[in-house]
Image (cartoon, rainbow, N blue to C red):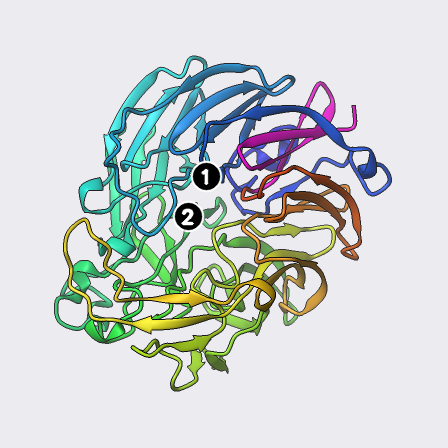
Amino acid sequence: MNADAEPHNWLTYSGNYASHRYSRLDQIDRSNVGDLRVLWAYQMDDGIIETTPVAVDGILYVTEPPSTVSALDARSGRQLWTWSPEMGPDVLNIGFPRVNRGVAVLDSTVFVGTLDAHLVALDARSGAVRWDVEVGDNAIGFSLTLAPLAVKDKVIVGVSGAEAGVRGYIDAYDAETGELAWRTYTIPAPGEPGSETWGGNSWETGGGSTWLTGSYDPELDLLYWPIGNPAPDWNGDVRPGDNLYTDCLLALDPDTGEMIWYFQFTPHDTHDWDANQIQVLLDAEWEGEPRKLVVTANRNAFYYVLDRETGEFLHGQEYSKQTWAEGLDENGRPIVIPGTDPTEEGVLVWPSLQGAANWFSPSYSPRTGLFYQPTRIMGAVYFKADVEYVPGQPYTGGGEQALRGEEASGAIKALDALTGELVWEFPLLSPPWSGAMATAGDLVFGGDNEGNIFALDAETGEPLWNFQSGGAVRSGPMSYEVDGRQRVVSSAGGTLFVFGLN
């Protein structure tokens, strides 16, 4: 709730409940960003780093792969405590790497999800375990890689596992006790609304993972959570219908989990185009009237503007190369081009299964009105295959062969947040896996697979600063202030870097 009033802290995964990933700090700006240098670095163990640290009053809480939490002195990087779960080598991670994207902090407790599908509450001062609950059965493919979201007195998490044929859900737990407060399934059981969109018993293994942190509007008291792909991924023959509520955005009552509305981006998805992208909340004038909006750049290569009170589709715009739809109809439903479903022989379609967007965060600057989207420009040949569900085994029904080398690229795209129209773009050599962060200093920070951590002019895209880290950048940048001085954080390879002017 206090994120915008405490710019010296970074209190939640996306910076604030509206998921702007925008820092109100302006000490580092266009005039001095060229003087940024590394102040300290923290070396992690082997693995892929996708964490965004949470900064609270001089302490950074970071996760290390696969599920370790460490508290660091924000001035020096000195480790204050560290905690790791006891997990065996047989922990499953089907369809995703062994990563963790961060923690939630509420009062004096740090919350983390683990690869073996537990949610654990830690004492923020010592790292001591306060409670530990099992969210899902890892033996059949459930796992937690997301940063939890603390809302009021609850901690909300989602699950990974669609590639193992799980039936997805979103859980809320009492922050004090760990008791389950509610569970909302993303695949309706027979007789429930939306169950008519699943043929036969396909709902039982329908996927619909919930593996990325949601957004929250305190005024409307609505929680917004993105939902993943149906299972099996590429063989839609065994699950006829639109397959609600996969590839949807759900608006939920955070006290009960009741679904208030939904919007489906890709009905009957056969390309693994999860809707697990960060949902950005903003208020703006729309056709002469003030409107509460939620905007998102979807994995399917379309940019969407929805009314976040009702879920009404207001606008859609292609923002990256795609060859699967002629466009969107008046309700936002894609007009699918025949012959673009996967086949046994293979079909070339843009975007690839990783999509034009993915889990890495966009950023929204209220100063420029621009939506900054790291964009993957890559196609793939999609294949379909027969598949049979076996608990704890991949349940995908095909695969893809992505185009690589000179046939793939990336960009930081600055889009008009209300229209999705391109304002500028900064080209990248390869499709990115790193998020973006805008700041009140009119900068946009980002990173690429080639090891560059960079700053761009938020209004023009002009490159202003670059640091060659020596390792691929896969995390979301953030910023905090300590002792009155702004810091910028990004990771690359196995190292967390903290930058400052002095």
Q: Is residue 264 magenta?
A: no
- In the depicted structure, whether residue 200 falls above or below residue 60: below
Amino acid tagged 2? Leu
Q: Is residue 395 left or right of residue 263?
A: left
Q: Is mark 2 on a helix, strand or loop?
A: loop
Tell me the residue at 54%/44% (across/down).
474
The alpha-carbon separation of the residues under discs 2 and 1 comes to 9 Å
Q: Which label was assigned to residue 212?
A: 2
Residues at marks 2 and 1 touching, judged by CB atoms closer than 8 Å: yes
Q: Residues within 10 Å of mark 2 (few under 14, many from 20)?
A: many
Image side of residue 127 versus residue 444, left or right: left
Badge 1 density bin: few <14, some 14–19, many ≥20, Cα 10 Å: many
Kindly identify which residue carries mark 1.
Answer: 101
Q: In this view, does 129 lie above or below 423?
A: above
Task: Identify the residue at the far right of this view.
Answer: 31
Q: Which of 410 and 135 is in front in this view?
A: 410
Image location of residue 473, percent across then percent down: 58, 43
What residue sits 27% from the left and 28% below the top? Answer: 87
Q: Which of 1 and 274 is in front in this view?
A: 274
Q: Is the magenta stretch mostly helix, strand or loop?
A: strand
Q: Residue 32 at what x, y percent from top left?
A: 84, 36
Q: In this view, does 72 lie to the left or right of 102?
A: right
Number of numbered callouts drawn: 2
Q: What residue type is labelled 1?
A: Arg
- Quarter holding the C terminus is top right
Picture coordinates of residue 241 (x, y %)? 25, 75
Disc 1 element: loop
In the displayed structure, would residue 153 be above or below residue 144?
above
- Magenta stretch, residue numbers: 476-502
